[in-house]
Image (cartoon, rainbow, N blue to C red):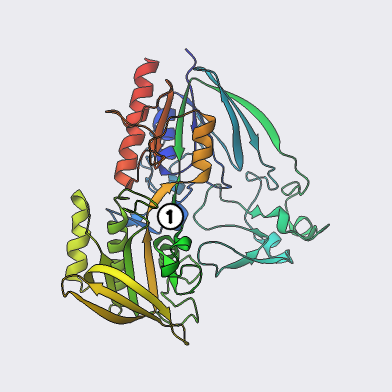
Amino acid sequence: MMKKACIIGSGLSALNAAVELADSGIEVTVISRDRYAGENAPNLYKAFPTDDCFFCVSATRLKDGIRKCFYRSGIFEHPNIKMYFDSKVESIEGNGPFLIKMQEGPIYIDHEKCIQCGACEEACPKTIQLKRKLQMTRRKAIYHRLQCLPYSYYIDREACPPDCEECIKACPVEGVINLNAPPKHLELEASVIILALSYKEFDPTNLTQLHYNTYKNVITQVQLARMLDPTGPTEGKIVRRSDNRPAKRIFMLQCVGSRDVENLPYCSEICCTFACKHALIIKNEREPETQVSIIYKDIRTLGLQEKYYREARDSGIDFVKGHLSLVKELSDGTLELLIYDALLNKLVRCPADLLILSAGLMPSENALDLLSIANISLDDFKFTVKDLDLVETNRKGIYAIGSIVKPLSIPEASILAKAATFKILENFT
């Protein structure tokens, strides 16, 4: 029997599964739609329940003593792992073995030859404003990201000035950059497939009463995570987006989009822990005098995550049971919040420098496209259909892990990744 596995996705679940299978002698192909591995992880700073960085994956057993850090896990040097980046799966044919048709690239920079000297970035004449996350970051059309693999430079080819070749002229290594590189169409065979696809935050824009994307000082928890990261756009400083002044009064609003029959009629499970984690980082690692308040319906810090709730209360973080009735922006960018406090049974007006929306989690559009291509059955909430087994799907030989199963914490995601690999190894023996 052919012992080949294809993992679609490159987040922590995908990489954990890849290492486990590769260490067991299985040939593993990892297909990433992104330019680098990690998916959401590069944007999330610290992970609960350990408060370590998000890049902890299973270390390969081929390298004794190696740490479990993503960058030293040995994934890129593993003889049984082949990774494709900036790649799109176009079709999945067969019922095991499977034929996966895909398009790779175009890949304009040879990641194996790039020495990350920075000469190309320095020479690049084009600076662009990012249109995502905090919308505060400016960078060159050719760039690299800290804490990303492959550790190389990347290029936004569509942003380059016509006929510009300054990066090629500056590069000291011949053949690294090819601005005319074509895409490649490939066909891969695999006996099993693991779908390890990512989530996205619910977009609160249509909840017009919250003024997300209208008031600069209204952001989401993922945007706050980028702000908390010392390598992020504000270098770890908590600031008002309107004027970059320190944010001293911070309010977090829970269940944005979640538990709402008009949007996401389910609890996203980890949002309360997400908020408590960030509140604790602000109080314990940034500015202890900052006022942090969390407006909630119910606190749902499940299992061992309850420690975050207890620590948050002990740290002086204010928990307000109720709901946010009104958000108004004053002339200086300060927000005025009208909050119904259910315990006091009264409306309270509060000034705020930042309003953080704890938005619900849902499968991304890319994930839903792949699930459709693979003909995977989904439930009413667009997650994979589950019976007693969380990782099996309606198609034999195709497994689902990660946030297309349900919103997951890092430990839960790791457990599902191992569950899928155990089933695959059992079938191969």
Q: Quadrant of residue 337?
A: bottom left
Which residue lies most toward the right here?
163
Does residue 279 appear to the left or right of 76 in the view shown? Answer: left
> Secondary structure under badge 1?
loop
Q: Position of residue 369 (x, y in %)?
A: 53, 38
Viewport quadrant of the C terminus: top left
- Look at the image and tell me whether residue 289 can be seen: no
Q: How many marks?
A: 1
Does residue 101 appear to the left or right of 318 in the view shown? Answer: right
At x 37%, y 40%, the residue is 58
Q: Position of residue 404 (x, y in %)?
A: 41, 40
Q: Which residue is mark 1?
A: 202
Name the foreground residue: 326 vs 83: 326
376 versus 66 height, above or below = above
At x 49%, y 39%, the residue is 368
Does residue 289 appear to the left or right of 124 in the view shown? Answer: left
